[in-house]
Amino acid sequence: MALLTQALMDIESVSGNERAIADAVEDYLRALGHLSVHRDGDSLVARTELGRAERVVLAGHLDTVPLPTTPGSRGTVPAQWDGNILFGRGATDMKGGVAVQLAIAAQLIEPNRDITFIFYDHEEVEASKSGLGRLLRNAPHLLEADFAILLEPTNGTVEGGCNGTTRFLLRTRGTAAHSARAWMGHNAIHDLADVLSRLQEYQPATVDVDGLAFRESLNAVRITGGVAGNVIPDAAEVEINYRFAPDKGIAEAEAHVRELLEGYEIERTDGAPGAKPGLNHPAAAAFVATVGAEPKPKYGWTDVARFSELGIPAVNFGPGDALLAHSDDEHVTGQAIRDCHEALLRWLSS
Ligand SMILES: N[C@@H](CCC[C@H](NC(=O)CCC(=O)O)C(=O)O)C(=O)O
């Protein structure tokens, strides 16, 4: 399984560049012969059609965040082994999970529930580009199910629900002038100092939702401004990302950010609501009991939100430590991948 993970990691698939990995996954699924396979762009749906009483989705995205830029980082492509630890982009988020999906697709010809395997593009970027969203528009019938498991990294436990995420552009405007005569202008970059200190002083909340403690985050994630080394900048822009607990929706999250940054020009550019854990739903509760470990909250955003919106109970359960996701040091152990695989295999064949 770790070698399958490595093979997937060796195919660079930063969001927008999923064609090669989708081709490889499609060839693999079609060669199995027992699944009905549907391709939509760089997303794939492969289903058993056994007429079982229940259908479960096992879903994972094929894309990754960009490769690290710091020289010497090990969370890059191709993957590399250090002892029994596999380093590289996508190790935790989430090619280990995709490898588990593929292994189960090959091994379980007669599972106890029908399985819909979904592999999709463009998860790590703005919600409007999501391959899963596109699948839902183009072929909603293929996604129908009683329960969904997202193989996002959860380190041996179930992570319930997910935080919501929303992004904003805050703009300041000044007056351009020669930087040797700065008093003739107004520096738009300097105006961001107040914005940055409000963000730095902000104390993010931890919100209890259905017994799980969701930690929120509010951060500047990108900053731009300035046209030349001798011009007072007349415009500057900071991108802000707010991760908010699933007790609130996008409108409430937006109002919170606008209140904190009152007085500034702000545009909301993206937003995806979170999902409450829903672990008291019978299907989710039964799965949590099978896994056996104490469930935790999912701090990142995942497509459990999309399935929950569709009325399909969903949880996160996949190999690797989410704390390493998107880091320059992304890695996963072979054991973590095997443990996740065995737990799912047990649940789908007992
Ligand atoms: N449309 C969203 C997509 C963001 C998805 C990404 N998810 C993860 O990293 C899950 C891994 C984890 O936290 O366990 C995210 O949260 O950034 C967006 O626009 O941000």
Image (cartoon, grey):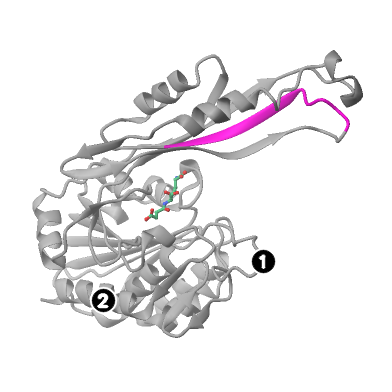
Q: Decide: is 100 above or below 130.
A: below
Q: CA distance from mark 1 to mark 2?
A: 32 Å
| Quarter of the view holding residue 36 | bottom left
Disc on the earlier residue, 1 or 2: 1
Q: Decide: is 231 above or below 119.
A: above
Camera-near label (1 vs 2) is 1
Q: Residue at x 20, y 50 (%)?
A: 313
Q: Residue at x 22, y 59 (%)?
A: 158
Q: Nearer the viewer, residue 66 or 26?
A: 66
Q: Decide: is 132 above or below 269.
A: below
| Quarter of the view holding residue 151 | bottom left
Whether the magenta-drawn stretch holds residue 237 is answered as: yes
- Kind of residue at badge 2: Asp
In the picture, measured across the screen, residue 233 lies left or right of residue 312, that is: right
Q: Nearer the viewer, residue 126 or 163?
A: 163
Question: Quadrant of the image for the N terminus?
Answer: bottom left
Q: Mark 1 sits on what residue?
A: 71
Is there a contact, CB below 8 Å, between mark 1 and mark 2? no
How crowded is the residue under tag 1: few (<14 C-alpha within 10 Å), some, or many (20+)? few
How many numbered marks appear? 2
In the rendered structure, which segment of residues is drawn in magenta? 230-242
Residue 317 x, y percent position in the rendering: 27, 62
- Kind of residue at badge 1: Pro
In the picture, measured across the screen, residue 350 lies left or right of residue 297, that is: left
Residue 92 x, y percent position in the rendering: 41, 66
User: In the structure shown, which secondary structural element does the residue marked by tag 2 occupy?
Assistant: helix
In the picture, measured across the screen, residue 99 lies left or right of residue 149, that is: right
Q: Residue at x 27, y 72 (%)?
A: 340
| Disc 1 within 8 angstroms of ligand 1 (CB) | no
How crowded is the residue under tag 2: few (<14 C-alpha within 10 Å), some, or many (20+)? some
Q: Mark 2 sits on what residue?
A: 339
